[in-house]
Structures are given as structure tokens and as C-alpha cells.
Image (cartoon, rainbow, N blue to C red):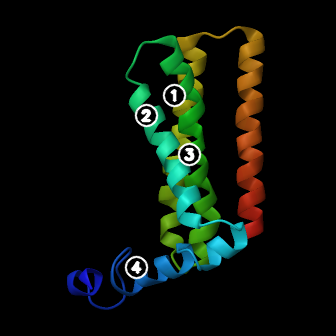
């Protein structure tokens, strides 16, 4: 198909042989879907979609939009951080560092924004710490399961 036309052969990240491998792993009957018990593309879409909504909301000064942004963007960051364990196992270790940068920077910026601009009460900041800690535990658990 189009993937073969644009990039015949190996060596390309999302097209050609690598594109077929990605669909084999993340497709409805792929390895990831079997491990998760649901289609992997659905989970990936929900995580990245939630983060995208959070990024779009971050431009608003409305308090609710800021709160939702600070909750949704770290969910997307978790997706990238889980891939730190995934890519080396699939023969693409060079993609682990970009995933650390993408996920880690999103987490850091969200935390900085909450602490600096939203100026939450002490109890609210502790609750946010617990939220980020829960997400980090989920990343470690999922990454450990993958590894």
C-alpha cells in the first residue's frame, strides 16, 4: 500500500516494514492488545487525546481549564514514559531518550505551572503530589510489566 510506496524496505520508523510491525503490535489482534485485554490503539488514543485536550486548555486563563490542563497533560506524559521501556525491547533504543524528554518535560512543566501560577493551598498541592505519584507508580508498573 501507501506505506510501501513511500518507504520500501526497512529502516523507517512508521512506514514500510516498521509500519507493518507497529500495526502487528498495536492492532486489534496484536501483542499489545492481547496483553492489555483491549485494543491498544484505543488506550493510546485516549491517553494522547486527553493530553491534547489538556494542552489546548492550557492557553485559557479560566481556573477550570487550568485545573483540567494540569490533570490531563501528565496523563499524556505517562504514555511517553511507558514507551521508555517499550522501545528498547522492540529494537529501537534510540527512541527511548526522546520519550524521556517528551514525558519528563511535560510532567515538569505541569508541576511548575501548578506550583507557580495556580498557587494552590497546601492540601491541594499535596493532593496533586499524590496524583502525580499515582501516575508515576502506574508508569513504573506498566513499564515493569512490559520489560
Nearest to the eye among marks 3 and 4: give it.
Answer: 4
Whole-angstrom CA distance, mark 3 to mark 4, is 23 Å
Judging by the rendered image, the residue that carries numbered circle 1 is 69
User: Residue 61, position in %: x, y?
Assistant: 42, 13
Task: State the mark number for residue 55.
Answer: 2
2 or 4: tag closer to the N-terminus: 4
User: Secondary structure beneath disc 1?
Assistant: helix
Whole-angstrom CA distance, mark 2 to mark 3, is 11 Å
Which residue is depicted at the point 36% across and 84% down?
A: 11
User: Residue 14, position in %: x, y?
Assistant: 37, 74
Nearest to the eye among marks 2 and 3: give it.
Answer: 2
**How many other residues sit within 10 Å of disc 4, few (<14), some (14-19) or many (≥20)?**
some
Q: Is residue 147 visible?
A: no
Judge left or right: residue 16 versus residue 142: left
Q: Is residue 15 visible?
A: yes
3 or 1: tag closer to the N-terminus: 1
**How many other residues sit within 10 Å of disc 2, few (<14), some (14-19) or many (≥20)?**
many
User: Residue 102, position in %: x, y?
Assistant: 48, 49
Which residue is depicted at the point 58% across and 62% down?
A: 83
Whole-angstrom CA distance, mark 3 to mark 1, is 12 Å
Nearest to the eye among marks 3 and 1: give it.
Answer: 1
Judging by the rendered image, the residue that carries numbered circle 3 is 77
Question: Camera-side residue: 38 or 103?
Answer: 38
User: From what the image shows, is residue 41 above or below residue 116?
Assistant: below
Amino acid at each position: 500500500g501507501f506505506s510501501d510506496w513511500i518507504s520500501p524496505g526497512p529502516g523507517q520508523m512508521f512506514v514500510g516494514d516498521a509500519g507493518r510491525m507497529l500495526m502487528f503490535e498495536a492492532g486489534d489482534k496484536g501483542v499489545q492488545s492481547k496483553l492489555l485485554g483491549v485494543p491498544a490503539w484505543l488506550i493510546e488514543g485516549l491517553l494522547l487525546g486527553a493530553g491534547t485536550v489538556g494542552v489546548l486548555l492550557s492557553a485559557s486563563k479560566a481556573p477550570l481549564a487550568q485545573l483540567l490542563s494540569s490533570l490531563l497533560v501528565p496523563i499524556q506524559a505517562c504514555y511517553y514514559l511507558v514507551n521508555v521501556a517499550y522501545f528498547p525491547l522492540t529494537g529501537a533504543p534510540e527512541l527511548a531518550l526522546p520519550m524521556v524528554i517528551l514525558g519528563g518535560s511535560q510532567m515538569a512543566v505541569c508541576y511548575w505551572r501548578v506550583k507557580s501560577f495556580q498557587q494552590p493551598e497546601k492540601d491541594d498541592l499535596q493532593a496533586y503530589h499524590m496524583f502525580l505519584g499515582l501516575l508515576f507508580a502506574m508508569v513504573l508498573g506498566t513499564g515493569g510489566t512490559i520489560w
